[in-house]
Amino acid sequence: MRDITLGQFVAGNSVIHKLDPRTKIAMMILYIAMTFLVKRIYFMAIPFAYLVLELILSGISLRYIVNSLKPIRILLIFMFILNLFFTSGENVWLDLGFWKLTGEAVLQSCFISIRIILLVAGASMLTLTTSPIALTDGIEKLLAPLKIFRFPAHELAMMMTIALRFVPTLMDESDKIRNAQMSRGADFESGNIFKRVKSMIPILIPLFVSSFRKADELAIAMESRCYHGGEGRTRMKQLKFRKEDLFAILITLLFMASLIVLLIVLK
């Protein structure tokens, strides 16, 4: 649980940290588009290179990215095995009669796993280099044109940011509850899977109670500060695009264009 990095912010003074949050959100969207445009595993080298470049420029330790992948390792294993069983092919590596292991299935399993890893790592980079307040302001600014349709842009951005911010808080709370239960003799490791799931109840119930209590405390704190939505709200720091933001978008578009050209040429 300590390894979950989604929602965590690592303060820094790097080039990526200084970018406008709207720029980083746009870069994230383009990065996701790149990963989904790729149809062959060797083309994944382009979004991978983009992620490595962003990691170097941000100064974020590789440990954070590795930790962000630990919570999804069960999902990765499940998706890998699932594609082995349900992907057909002609290059048979192993024939058991009822099931054939093919080279195409192994390649597809690796492809899906790499895509998930890149998506999770990219999402972690956004939250690791952007403070919750900046992320809220960036999302609200990007959704501002929808206000003409009475779309609650500020409220939606605030809810998304609070939800992200509460992820590491709740994980830390669950770790404390687990240690407290273990000190009282609770056993979460032994037994079959059903017994282990049942043993999680002493953790889940206090965690839900704590979550509602924290939400209530947050609501009271916001009301005591006269928070009433985005109407009439001012900001101490105004978002401004700089030349660095333009260069970042151009570099991202360059990676995107390179991928599209390769997909056309090597189709």
Image (cartoon, helix red, strand yellow):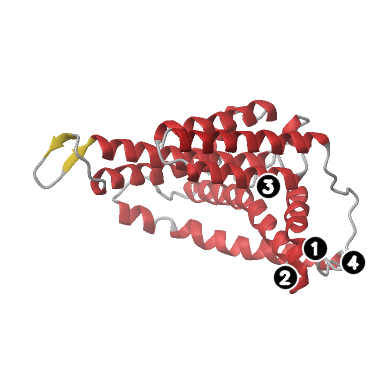
First reached walking from the N terminus: tag 4 or tag 3: 3
Q: Amino acid at mark 3?
A: Ile
Between marks 1 and 3 in the image, the one whose residue lies nearer the viewer: 3
Q: Amino acid at mark 2?
A: Phe
**Badge 3: residue crowd in 10 Å (few <14, some 14–19, many ≥20):** some
Q: Secondary structure at mark 1?
A: helix
First reached walking from the N terminus: tag 2 or tag 3: 3
**Residue 197 shows in this picture:** yes
Residue hosting label 4? 232
Residue hosting label 3? 25
Could you tell me residue 78's position as x and y percent?
A: 34, 46
| Marks 4 and 1 in Cβ contact (< 8 Å) | no
Q: CA gap, disc 1 to disc 3? A: 28 Å
The label shown at residue 95 is none
Q: Amino acid at mark 1?
A: Ala
Direction from residue 16 to residue 79 in the image, left or right? left
Could you tell me residue 232's position as x and y percent?
A: 90, 66
Direction from residue 189 to residue 161 in the image, left or right? right
Viewer-proximal residue, 90 or 48? 90
Residue hosting label 2? 151
Could you tell me residue 16's position as x and y percent?
A: 72, 34
Query: Residue at left 64%, top 53%?
Result: 164
User: Does residue 202 sit above or below 148 in this rendering?
Assistant: above
Q: CA gap, disc 4 to disc 1? A: 19 Å
The label shown at residue 221 is 1
| Marks 1 and 2 in Cβ contact (< 8 Å) | no
Q: CA gap, disc 2 to disc 3? A: 19 Å
Query: Residue at left 74%, top 54%?
Result: 136
Q: CA gap, disc 4 to disc 3? A: 25 Å
Q: Secondary structure at mark 4?
A: loop
Query: Residue at left 77%, top 50%?
Result: 133
